[in-house]
Amino acid sequence: MHQLIDSHCHWDHPRLQNLQPDLWQSCLDQGVTQLIVPATQASHFQRQITLCQLNPHWHLALGLHPYFSHIHSSDHLQLLHQAIVAHKPVAVGEIGLDFSPDMSSKRCTQAEQEVWLLAQLDVAQEYRLPIIVHCRKANDRLAQLLRRHAFAEGGIVHAFSGSQQQAQAFTKQGFKIGFGGTLTYERAQAMQRLAIALPLADIVLETDAPDMPMAGSDRSLPNRPDYLPRVLQQLATLRPESVEQIAKQTYTNTQQVLRLD
């Protein structure tokens, strides 16, 4: 049995909590022994905090997601400061940029997103925390802002979608690249090529549960963290290393970048 860390799981989501306690037992049965639980908005901080206090293997991350930039406020940023001091999350996240066309319906401009990103980079630097990054259609701009900000704490670029050159712009700044269910789709040729090209030391595994379903899954049902071994197996079919080597290295990668005990 391989020990795995799901580096991005919205464990507090009601669709997953409705499956408890059987789901956590299934995770353990599948070797998924730790979860990183990122935030999206301040109104969910307390439910995450309360949940993660129940198990030391459920690791709290707190941040303000770009998708909700139109509802974030200075009060929420202050809550983030207070929660970090009180509850010591492993990362600031999920933060970042989302320049995909559907964001226009959220009345959320790129400039507004950048304001919230930079404010939270300041927070992460103040508390010397890594970040968990959401980035869609904005890889070059995000990498540029991280360089300008001289952000030195590193982190994870979750559900990465982009070129090898763009991925390396992040890994050179101390980031790991997250691979999840999308890798399991036959049509995901570009992502599979990237998974082959990157050094194994730059890769972490994730599910983004209850989102980002695996190939062949029933889309009416939530994606689950106990499906993480499917991502591991797919990576092992692509790369020269054994399943055991990939499991061990990706586990170590997540531990190191998020400074887990």
Image (spheres, rainbow, N blue to C red):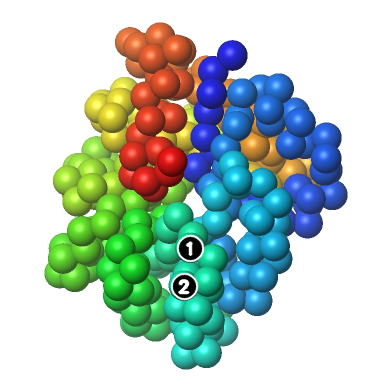
* Residue identified by numbered label 2: 85
Count numbered badges in the picture. Answer: 2
Residue occupying the point 75% across, 28% down: 26
* Residue identified by numbered label 1: 88
* Position of residue 21 measured from the top left corner of the image (x, y, whole percent): 83, 40
Which element is circle 2 on? helix
* Position of residue 55 measured from the top left corner of the image (x, y, whole percent): 66, 46
Residue occupying the point 78% across, 56% down: 14
Compared with 188, 209 (above or below) is: below
The residue closer to the viewer here, 88 or 106, is 88
Which element is circle 1 on? loop
The residue closer to the viewer here, 111 or 177, is 177
Mark 2 belongs to which amino acid? Val
Give residue 58's mark. Answer: none
Compared with 46, 159 (above or below) is: above
Mark 1 belongs to which amino acid? Lys
Mark 1, residues whose alpha carbon is within 10 Å: few (<14), some, or many (≥20)? Answer: some
Q: Is residue 218 left or right of residue 172?
A: right
- Quadrant of the drawing holding the N terminus: top right
Q: Is residue 159 left or right of residue 122?
A: right
Mark 2, residues whose alpha carbon is within 10 Å: few (<14), some, or many (≥20)? Answer: few
Q: Is residue 173 visible?
A: yes
Residue occupying the point 61% across, 23% down: 31
Residue occupying the point 69% across, 31% down: 27
Compared with 146, 224 (above or below) is: above
Cα separation between marks 1 and 2: 6 Å
Compared with 24, 244 (above or below) is: above
Q: Are marks 1 and 2 in contact (CB under 8 Å)?
A: yes
* Position of residue 158 measured from the top left corner of the image (x, y, whole percent): 43, 48
Splitting the image into 4 quarters, where does residue 96 fall?
Answer: bottom left
